[in-house]
């Protein structure tokens, strides 16, 4: 930025000298031109301590961009700062990160990610700044169409997005987790093990040492009593204290110890723990959608959905009502509820919440949502937003202030609050936290998952009054722990060591190639891996030249050696892909299928395993870029 | 016992042993006895320096989380700059020299050796009849910490192991994973510029050279050990060369400043001062 200006200043000095010599015109013509300089791009990602994989992808890209003559600045920032920079301030060139959904997702996820209607908003809605009519049209089409029409639209959408490359999909990681063998079982093996449904699906290992397990309900009536064994649990007073059984997790991500705001984009990774605090109306369970906080929902006509609620209470004892649901949708569309000039939509769940256009409370337990004429799949997606208590969040609709001063009228208290003492209706409720160190949740004894225990079942055999109707039996009576404690660990290695040493039951955050081999060294520890849909990607700021040029982005995409990344960075625990929907069943057209180790659309400039620099430069020359005599890629006006 | 407490007690235990051995070998039993009897006077004499160090350490412990937030939000994002400046130098060190024996050596030096290196001079200079060196040392420590804290706040950067994990192995943490718990307790991974390990070690090394007449044995040990710590910071992938260079600059600056700030007060300190001064360093002092 400063270099051309100073050079121009120098030329201005020369110009003065030249003017006295009487050749002003020509000098002015030269001095008036901005000189070309080397293209500089900044890559942002988190340090290895926070995520061992993203930085390795960034490093490879940095090396390859440097090799073709670009001046690369590789910048590492904390996780909150990365998303603040990318999602909130949109002040970035390139970032490396992960998508936010771990379960295989529907193509409608791309609506929030790439639709141009969100171009002026902050958050996970179109962080790239893509404005393409073709993409918008296909996004609308896949919302309306059904059956094979929809498949066609989804195929075309993926092909268009792949061509335009607002982001380059790198790989779908296997979610690796080190777990204790003898404490909990039922770790999901085909999906992300530490997820809302994954954690709720856990059960106690029968006969596991339950030192201090005061209250053993349901299946493991024999569990308590064995108080003397296991140095692992006996040494740690927190393991199973007075509160009963504790599930102890370790993570390198300290954000959950500071902030419990389900709509704060920069503080959420996948939203697993806020997902346990806040219920959604429906949940995906494997490939089906099951009613959750909603007892049922019905499509009355094309544009109307009636949702009836289960009998539920907020963690503070207030009842969950239809008006809370109506409030939530209104609030997600505009967290200011009209109190500031422009609407301030949420930085998360924007694609989903944009579907609900109006909401009406029919009675205490029924709400009528107005949706556009869209297909069933998309409607179900719209029902997957966290339902928030009106009596808490309606207080947070004013513009955010620091010491009384408003900084930005487009920021409401709701999107910046840490949401201390979160009040949800979910199966877990907040107990305590020490910022940067740990957070403790406890089981919500009032939740519908645990409500009809033992005797009640026989009396309320009637399907309609069963408080758990429609919920898969494996979640009944869950969670299988009384407390959930998340401890912050400085790196993936120490997280694995904590599990191996018996002071934690499972790791949450990503494990890298240094830590995975350690899992096998302890007999009590095993590796659980499931495929995650949270793909690693390289995101481009399409608002900035030359990343605004889809041809330039296509060349950058071809500098990423996805196969090598899968092999070296992930040690094989990942699958390279071209489409963001590669984890979703039957979603990827043959034209985008990854085969024979090469990308079907943007193949790596491969020269026997390393980058073919000449081919990459030739590709850049072909699309109009130029190099100086030292091989530096030139740009103007950066 | 939690892993954190066990590694902490292991460090404290080993350092205590090393301090005891070095006290006998370097200071000598007679002088130690003399120190014991004169302890209160000498501490009183150096009280301001002692209080200064305590205040700085306390401020660092209390203020660090808040300053870290300031650094994250408003600090100079220097990782890209430092990495661009020196590239893969640290990776080269590891690729060229790394061996299991050296890794074991440098890991121990970085944790145990460093703690010993910083702690011992305080005892050694306390054992000198005049407190000038003790006061200079403490003032230099306080300056190191204070200026280091300011620079940590101004400059936000991650170390090589966090930026080039494909080329730089976090050797300390892969070999002594427990230590990471201790390290993370006293240090943030974004506080790498300057290297305080380097600056404090070099400070101690410089003082050791300046007081070589009093403790010639210590000079040899301290120089060797402090250079080992300096190399260890890079060998283990924790610091950049840039951090180390800045650490040297900080150390020399702090020592020079400590000499300017602290007056020797030859006559004032102790009545027997002038007499003691004439004796050679390791010779036992007779009276109490």
Image: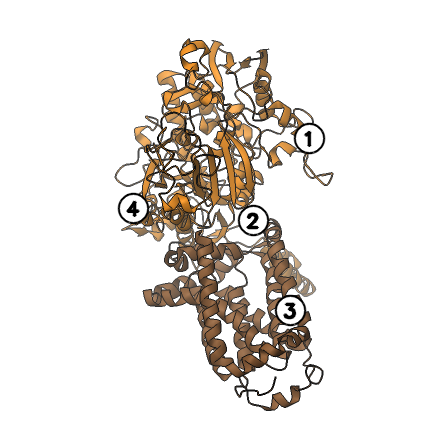
Chain colours: A orange, B brown
Q: CA distance from mark 2 to mark 4?
A: 59 Å
Dot 1 falls on a residue whose secondary structure is loop
Find disc 4 in the rendering and name its residue. Answer: A523
Find disc 2 in the rendering and name its residue. Answer: A637
Dot 4 falls on a residue whose secondary structure is loop
**B92, above or below A458, in the image:** below
Q: Quadrant of residue A340?
A: top right
Please, which chain is the residue tagged with disc 2 on? A
Which circle, 2 or 3, is nearer the viewer?
A: 3
**Closer to the camera, A222 or A428?**
A222
Q: Position of residue B225 (x, y in %)?
A: 46, 73
- The answer to the question of whether label 2 and label 3 lie on touching residues, with beta carbons closer than 8 A, is no
| Mark 4 and mark 1 on one chain | yes
Q: CA distance from mark 3 to mark 1?
A: 50 Å
Dot 3 falls on a residue whose secondary structure is helix
- Please give left or right for residue A108 compared with residue A404 in the image: left
Find disc 1 in the rendering and name its residue. Answer: A398
- Disc number for residue B50: 3
Q: CA distance from mark 2 to mark 3?
A: 56 Å
Q: Quadrant of the C terminus of chain B?
A: bottom right
Q: Position of residue B172 (x, y in %)?
A: 41, 60
């Amino acid at each position: 930025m400063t270099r051309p200006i100073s050079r121009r200043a120098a030329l201005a000095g020369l110009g003065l000298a030249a003017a006295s010599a009487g050749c002003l015109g020509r000098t002015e013509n030269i001095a008036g031109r901005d000189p070309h300089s080397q293209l500089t791009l900044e890559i942002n990602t988190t340090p290895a301590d926070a995520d061992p994989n993203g930085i390795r992808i960034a490093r490879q890209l940095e090396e390859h961009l440097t090799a073709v003559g670009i001046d690369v600045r590789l910048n590492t920032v904390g996780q909150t700062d990365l998303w603040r920079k990318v999602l909130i301030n949109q002040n970035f060139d390139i970032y490396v990160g992960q998508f936010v959904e771990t379960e295989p997702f529907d193509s409608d996820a791309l609506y929030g990610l790439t639709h141009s209607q969100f171009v002026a908003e902050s958050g996970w809605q179109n962080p790239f700044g893509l404005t393409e009519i073709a993409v918008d049209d296909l996004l609308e089409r896949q919302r309306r169409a059904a059956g094979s029409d929809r498949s066609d639209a989804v195929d075309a959408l993926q092909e268009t997005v792949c061509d335009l490359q607002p982001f380059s999909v790198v790989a779908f990681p296997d979610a690796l987790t080190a777990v204790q063998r003898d404490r909990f079982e039922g770790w999901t093996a085909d999906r992300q093990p530490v997820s809302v449904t994954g954690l709720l699906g856990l059960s106690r290992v029968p006969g596991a040492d339950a030192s201090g397990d005061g209250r053993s309900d349901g299946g493991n009536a024999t569990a308590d009593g064995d108080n003397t064994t296991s140095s692992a649990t006996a040494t740690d007073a927190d393991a199973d204290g007075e509160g009963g059984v504790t599930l102890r997790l370790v993570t390198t991500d300290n954000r959950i110890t500071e902030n419990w705001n389900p709509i704060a984009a920069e503080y959420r990774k996948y939203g697993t723990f806020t997902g346990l605090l806040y219920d959604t109306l429906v949940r995906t369970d494997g490939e089906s959608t099951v009613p959750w906080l909603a007892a049922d929902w019905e499509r009355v006509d094309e544009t109307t959905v009636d949702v009836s609620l289960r009998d539920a209470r907020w963690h503070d004892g207030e009842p969950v009502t239809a008006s809370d649901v109506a409030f939530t949708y209104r609030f997600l569309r505009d967290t200011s509820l009209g109190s500031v000039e422009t609407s301030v939509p949420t930085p998360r769940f924007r694609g989903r919440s944009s579907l609900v256009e109006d909401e009406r409370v029919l009675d205490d337990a029924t709400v009528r949502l107005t949706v556009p004429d869209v297909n069933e799949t998309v409607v179900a997606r719209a029902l997957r937003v966290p339902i928030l208590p009106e009596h808490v969040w309606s207080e947070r609709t004013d513009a955010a202030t620091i010491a009384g001063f408003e900084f930005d009228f487009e920021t409401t208290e709701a999107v910046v609050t840490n949401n201390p003492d979160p009040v949800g209706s979910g199966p877990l409720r907040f107990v305590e936290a020490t910022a940067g160190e740990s957070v403790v949740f406890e089981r919500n004894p009032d939740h519908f998952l645990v409500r009809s225990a033992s005797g009640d079942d026989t009396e309320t055999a009637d399907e309609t009054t069963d408080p758990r109707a429609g919920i898969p039996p494996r979640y009944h009576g869950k969670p299988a722990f009384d407390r959930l404690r998340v401890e912050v660990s400085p790196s993936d290695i120490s997280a694995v060591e904590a599990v191996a040493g018996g002071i934690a039951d499972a790791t949450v955050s990503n494990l890298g190639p240094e830590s995975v081999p350690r899992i096998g060294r302890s007999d009590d520890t095993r590796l659980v891996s499931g495929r995650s849909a949270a793909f690693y990607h390289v995101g481009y700021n399409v608002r900035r030249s030359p990343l605004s040029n889809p041809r330039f982005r296509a060349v950058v995409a071809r500098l990423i050696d996805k196969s090598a990344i899968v092999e070296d960075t992930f040690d094989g625990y990942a699958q390279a892909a071209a489409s963001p929907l590669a984890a979703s069943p039957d979603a990827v057209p043959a034209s985008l299928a990854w085969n024979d180790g090469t990308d079907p659309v943007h193949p790596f400039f491969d020269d026997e395993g390393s980058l073919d620099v000449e081919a990459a430069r030739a590709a850049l020359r072909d699309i109009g870029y130029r190099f100086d005599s030292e091989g530096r890629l030139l740009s103007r006006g950066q | 016992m939690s892993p954190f407490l066990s590694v902490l007690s292991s460090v404290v235990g080993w350092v205590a042993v090393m301090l005891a051995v070095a006290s006998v070998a370097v200071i000598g039993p007679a002088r130690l006895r003399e120190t014991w009897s004169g302890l209160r006077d000498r501490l009183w004499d150096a009280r301001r320096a002692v209080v200064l160090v305590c205040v700085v350490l306390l401020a660092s412990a209390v203020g660090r989380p808040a300053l870290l937030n300031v650094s994250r939000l408003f600090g100079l994002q220097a990782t890209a700059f430092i990495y661009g400046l020196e590239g893969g130098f640290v990776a080269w060190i590891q690729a060229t020299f790394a061996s299991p024996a050296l890794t074991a050596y440098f890991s121990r030096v970085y944790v145990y050796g460093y703690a010993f290196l910083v702690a011992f001079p305080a005892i050694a200079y306390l054992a000198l009849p005049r407190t000038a060196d003790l006061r200079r040392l403490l003032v230099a420590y306080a300056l190191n910490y204070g200026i280091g804290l300011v620079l940590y706040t101004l400059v936000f950067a991650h170390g090589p192991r966090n930026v080039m994990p494909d080329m730089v192995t976090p050797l300390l943490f892969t070999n002594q994973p427990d230590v990471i718990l201790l390290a993370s307790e006293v240090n943030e991974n974004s506080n790498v510029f300057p290297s305080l390990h380097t600056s404090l070690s070099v400070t101690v090394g410089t003082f050791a050279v300046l007081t070589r007449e009093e403790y010639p044995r210590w000079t040899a040990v301290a120089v060797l050990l402090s250079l080992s710590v300096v190399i260890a910071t890079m060998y283990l992938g924790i610091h950049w060369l840039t951090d180390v260079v800045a650490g040297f600059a900080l150390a020399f600056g702090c020592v020079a400043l400590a000499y300017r700030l602290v007056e020797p007060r030859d006559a004032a300190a102790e009545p027997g001062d002038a007499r003691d001064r004439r004796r050679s360093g390791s010779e036992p002092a007779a009276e109490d």
